[in-house]
Amino acid sequence: MLYPGVRCRKGAIHLWRVLFMALPVAGCALLAACSRSGPEINDAGYEVNTAYVATGQDSRVRFIVLHYTSENNEDSLRILTKNRVSSHYLLTDGQEPVLYRLVDENRRAWHAGSSQWYGYKNLNAMSVGIEIVNKGPLNPEKTLWESYSSRQIDILAALLKDLAQRHRIHPRNIVGHSDIAPQRKIDPGPLFPWEALARQGIGRWYNKNRVRQHEAMFRSTGLPDIFWFQEKLRHIGYEVAFGANNEEQTRKVLQAFQMHYRPQRYDGEPDIQTAAILMDLAGQP
Ligand SMILES: [Zn+2]
């Protein structure tokens, strides 16, 4: 804890010390008149001068990772505060969703696990994690999913805009858990409204006209081979192993890609529309 208001000009600091020790209440009142620059005494007993702020700095947060909790409000809150899993934010569901901040943005939350995006590994250290209360798949076949409510998405959009602006996060670095860990995760699922958020300027999206042109081209040239898909997926951030032996692994990455960008069908099969969207995203700066 810092002593409230103990930020004084250098010459004044000794006087404040005496006042602070002798007359804590009067000291506090007088200290309020101090300049906000200069030495600062903390409770560890040393002074720090905060008069200068370096221009060469930026946020440590590079990514935002979206999740669903698969649990109800109460259980989500309990699990994310009492266990070894956590997130910076938790957005509940219901009539009046509540946005909880459970971990300070400058600290690391434990939400991503083993993960990779554009070659960056283990994204907990560099990301803000947002958990949304949503059941995910409603049947074992994973063909029915719970929708996110419009109230949740309104709150989420405001939060994402604010985070992206404050931490200067590139649109391509706003991702789902399934994007950064496609071999083991499927959240936030195919009903997460990536396209609707992209219309508000949140996250990366493709250009429909260009995708139509790419589709026409692939119809005449035929579908590219698995190596082409692997190369393009890696180019747009996904972790994917190269080679014909990695077909099953590649299918899971394609499934994650489709859930995000083409949620109407997410069977992991390479097809013309998937190739066309991939090609457009790979061509973006
Ligand atoms: Zn997750």
Image: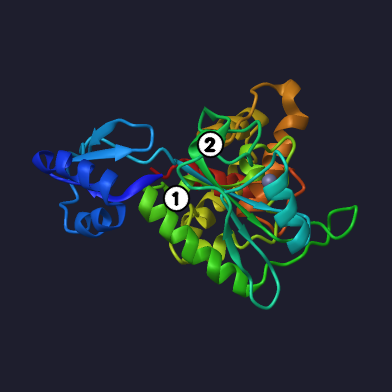
Q: Residue at x 61, y 74 (%)?
A: 151
Q: Is residue 285 left or right of residue 221?
A: left
In the rendered image, the residue lying farthest to the front is: 22
- In space, the residues marked 2 and 1 are separated at their CA atoms by 12 Å
Camera-side residue: 9 or 64? 9
Q: Is residue 267 above or below residue 159?
A: above
- Classify mark 1: helix, strand or loop: helix
Horizontal and vertical percent for residue 283? Answer: 44, 42
Horizontal and vertical percent for residue 189? Answer: 71, 54
Horizontal and vertical percent for residue 200? Answer: 46, 66
Camera-side residue: 176 or 238? 176
Give the numbered dot on residue 171. 1
Camera-side residue: 171 or 245? 171
Asked whether residue 135 appears in the rendered view, the answer is no
Mark 2 or mark 1: name the one nearer the start of the chain. 1
Q: Residue at x 19, y 57 (%)?
A: 30
Instruction: Report which quarter residue 72 is drawn in.
Output: bottom right
Q: Which residue is mark 2?
A: 237
Number of residues whose C-alpha sits closer than 10 Å to that of mark 1, classed few (under 14), some (14–19) or many (20 or more) = some
Q: Residue at x 73, y 38 (%)?
A: 252
- Badge 1 amino acid: Pro
In the rendered image, the residue lying farthest to the bottom is: 95
Q: Is residue 107 left or right of residue 92?
A: left
- Classify mark 2: helix, strand or loop: loop
Q: Is residue 191 left or right of residue 100?
A: right
Beta carbon of the mark 2 residue lies under 8 A of ligand 1: no
> Where, quadrant-wise, is the C terminus in this rendering?
top left
Beta carbon of the mark 1 residue lies under 8 A of ligand 1: no
